[in-house]
Image: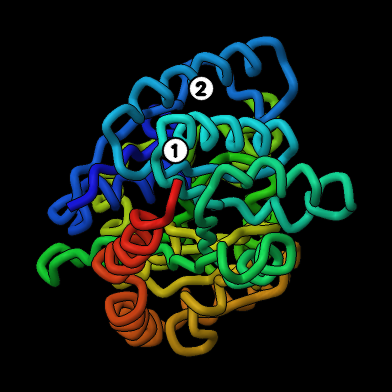
Amino acid sequence: MSRVLLVGKGPPDRGGIPSFLRTLLTGPLAERHQLTFLNVAHSGVPQGGRATASNLGRTLRDFVRVWRAARGQDIVHVHSAMAPAVTVLRAGLLAFAGRLRNCSVILHVHGSELEAWLRDGFRLRLLRLATSPAHRVAVCWTNGERLLVGALGAERVRLVDNGVEIPLETEVNPGTGTPARVLYAGLLTPRKGILDLLAASELLHARGVAHTLCLVGGTPDEGPESEAPVRNAAAAAHAVLAGSRPPEQMHGAYADADIFCLPSWYEAMPLSIMEAAAHGLPVVATDVGDVDRAVLDGITGFVVPVKSAPSLAAALEKLLSDPEARARMGAAGRHHIRMNFSSEATARAVERLYVEVVGPVR
């Protein structure tokens, strides 16, 4: 049993990193290792990795917090989106704090924004500097793995698939409402493709395809100003804005829905589509990151082009008009996630990583 300090953003933050950390802290990994969580989220206005005085001050305070909390630990496991530059440097400093305590250090990359950000030699050097304190760099999607292997070398980079808790069969009760309900869950920001989804919903209403569109989500990392266009468009399209929900209340949101849709412009390996599929929902999602590994096109749902409202509308219409297809694809999706992307599978992958790093000379 290793003593592990998990460092990352938890509540009140929402999104992939808090969800992933919750899976580690409440899942089988916690039964086999002594996990301590250091929450570096803050309650102020999100600043999206901008170079502000408050961000700098918070990073320095968190550096000290990690250094103190890492005392007596075997491993420091830092979770970060690793883009833009401010976030890269912040993650590197937190990893360095763990290294100063003579701990083995893992830097876990969660954000697909790294692919667009890492486009010149200066940024490559910055990435190498920031990751230099880490014994291993974990990544959750295959394009990211290829990118980081090219930048850092295969000996330091490991692919660790995201995974989700599989609810009991008795907890799975996909909605059968009339009209059928389409659920989106995520941050309320244009980069998540919500405006494309709202446009697709309008196309469907114009064709006489009845449905209800429900948006569950909160303020994005870019700040509340990024949320305004989504709220305005949702009001015009008569979509339901259900607000943000804590993870323990998402079971009810999935149970009330008939279809899940994630129309993002970019992702790594989104947990929301796995959670929805694990609850028996067919999924319509854009072809980004490793979505096509979690959603089997034509089998568990549909994978459509990015920024294409007509493609979204066509895929949703197939499911909205065919309850039997929804049930068949939902069942297939639940089986696919259970067999390939469970929290148990993720725990085993993370544990293999812990075994790797706990031995190197520090």
Does residue 259 lie above or below 105 as drawn? below
Q: Nearer the viewer, residue 129 or 193?
A: 129
Does residue 30 lie above or below 232 as drawn? below
Which mark sits nearer the N-terminus, 1 or 2?
1
Residue under the image location 26 percent in, 59 percent down: 255
- Cα distance between the residues tagged 1 and 2: 22 Å
Residue under the image location 64 percent in, 64 percent down: 144
Residue under the image location 66 percent in, 41 percent down: 130
In the image, what residue type sits under mark 1? Arg
For residue 303, side relative to residue 276 (left or right): right
- Mark 1 sits on what residue? 14
Alpha-carbon neighbours of circle 1 within 10 Å: few (<14), some, or many (≥20)?
many
Tell me residue 63's x, y (percent): 51, 22
Residue under the image location 89 percent in, 52 percent down: 120
In the image, what residue type sits under mark 2? Phe
Label number found at residue 153: none
